Amino acid sequence: MSDIKSNANNASLPNVEQPTLLIVDDDPALRERLARAFGKRGFEVMVAGGRTEANAAANHDSPEFAIVDLKMTDGNGLEVVRDLIAIDPQTKVLVLTGYGSIATAVDAVKLGALSYLSKPADVDDILAAFDRGEGEALDPSRIDYKAPSLARVEWEHINRVLADCGNNISEAARRLGIHRRSLQRKLQKYAPR
């Protein structure tokens, strides 16, 4: 990450190449705000509103870094992560979403994402996430871990089973051993904290 910071700080120098960044989000206001902020930090920024635009941009000029929203109208962020890594395995992808769960975070990392952040996140949060992803592993003895509530663990387990079933409610209910309507009611609730 020190390369990113030094390149961003030296962006005005003529022989220093700017790091490239692709921002994929279907919210034009957020996309443009992030693009301006990263442009001011010395990044060469490309933007895309969905999966099709992201693939076209990455095929034209593969970015060094990518920020991908999980929910979008044109596919989903996990598909975009998979596509970007397939185009260039060296691309460092960060998934940014307002609908976070451990299940989707695990899926994103399995597909090759460097890290996963919940919205709202600013440029400093995103740069720190890229930095953590490239740095050394954290020392477990220095981590202050707060266990999730039982309701949160149940909600994440249900969503993981549902994802494993390809979002088939009936199959997920069968695997969980609960009635389909009960599962539907649980899924309509917001994620517990």
Image (cartoon, grey):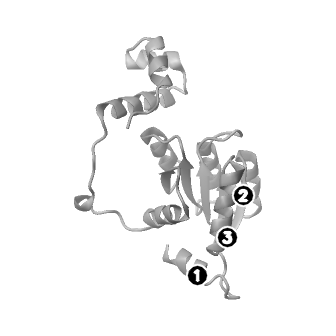
Provide the secondary structure element on which disc 3 rests: helix
Q: Residues within 10 Å of mark 2 (few under 14, many from 20)?
A: many
Quarter that holds the C terminus: top left
Outermost bottom residue:
14
Task: State whether residue 191 appears in this view.
Answer: yes
Task: Give the Cα distance between marks 3 and 1.
Answer: 12 Å
Q: Is residue 137 left or right of residue 43?
A: left
At x 54%, y 26%, the residue is 167
Disc with the residue nearer the chain's start (2 vs 1) = 1
At x 47%, y 45%, the residue is 105
Q: Position of residue 133 (x, y in %)?
A: 45, 62
**Amino acid type indicated by mark 3:** Gly
Residue at image mark 1: 9
Disc with the residue nearer the chain's start (3 vs 2) = 3
Residue at image mark 2: 47
Disc with the residue nearer the chain's start (3 vs 1) = 1
Q: Residues within 10 Å of mark 3 (few under 14, many from 20)?
A: some
Residue at image mark 3: 39
Image disc number at residue 33: none
Provide the secondary structure element on which disc 1 rests: helix
At x 50%, y 57%, the residue is 114
| Residues at marks 3 and 2 touching, judged by CB atoms closer than 8 Å | no
Q: Pick whichever, 19 or 73, lies toward us.
A: 73
Q: Position of residue 182 (x, y in %)?
A: 43, 14
| Residues at marks 3 and 1 touching, judged by CB atoms closer than 8 Å | no
At x 68%, y 63%, the residue is 35
Q: Is residue 50 left or right of residue 142?
A: right
Task: Give the Cα distance between marks 2 and 1.
Answer: 22 Å
Task: Give the Cα distance between marks 3 and 2.
Answer: 12 Å
Q: Is residue 10 above or below residue 181?
A: below
Provide the secondary structure element on which disc 2 rests: strand
